[in-house]
Image (spheres, rainbow, N blue to C red):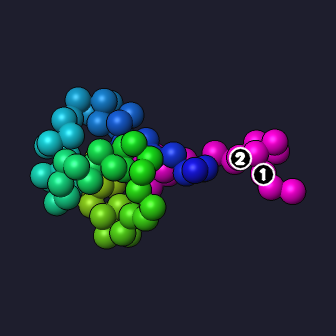
Amino acid sequence: MPIVVRIDVELARRKMSVTEFAERVGITPANVAVLKNGRAKAVRLSTLESMCEVLNCQPGDLLEWIPETADRQPG
């Protein structure tokens, strides 16, 4: 998947645990793990807003688009 979630980087910068982050955002630690491990297929904008508020960051600090290499694209 070309979208990479960088929550772990932002949590490490703030020395914040997944449990504390989940509580402050209002999601479960299991859902944080799904996001961190790249298994999420979607994220609600309200959740993204809460994550940015808790971490005092921009959406681009949490999400990064990595283009697929030419050899992986169909065609």
| Residue range (magenta) | 56-75
In-front residue for pair 49/7: 7
N-terminal of the pair, mark 2 or mark 1, is: 2
* Residue receiving disc 2: 68
Q: Amino acid at mark 2?
A: Glu
Mark 1: secondary structure: loop
Mark 2: secondary structure: loop
Residue found at the very far front of the displayed protein: 75
* Residue receiving disc 1: 73
> Residue at (36%, 69%) from the top-left corner?
44
For the residues labelled 2 and 1, say whether their Cβ atoms are less than 8 Å apart: yes
Measured from the top left, where is residue 30 in percent x and y?
22, 49
Measured from the top left, where is residue 45 in percent x and y?
38, 69
Crowding at label 1, few (<14), some or many (≥20) Cα neighbours within 10 Å?
Answer: few
Q: Is residue 34 above or below residue 17?
A: below
Q: Is residue 60 magenta?
A: yes
Measured from the top left, where is residue 5 in percent x and y?
45, 46
In-front residue for pair 54/74: 74
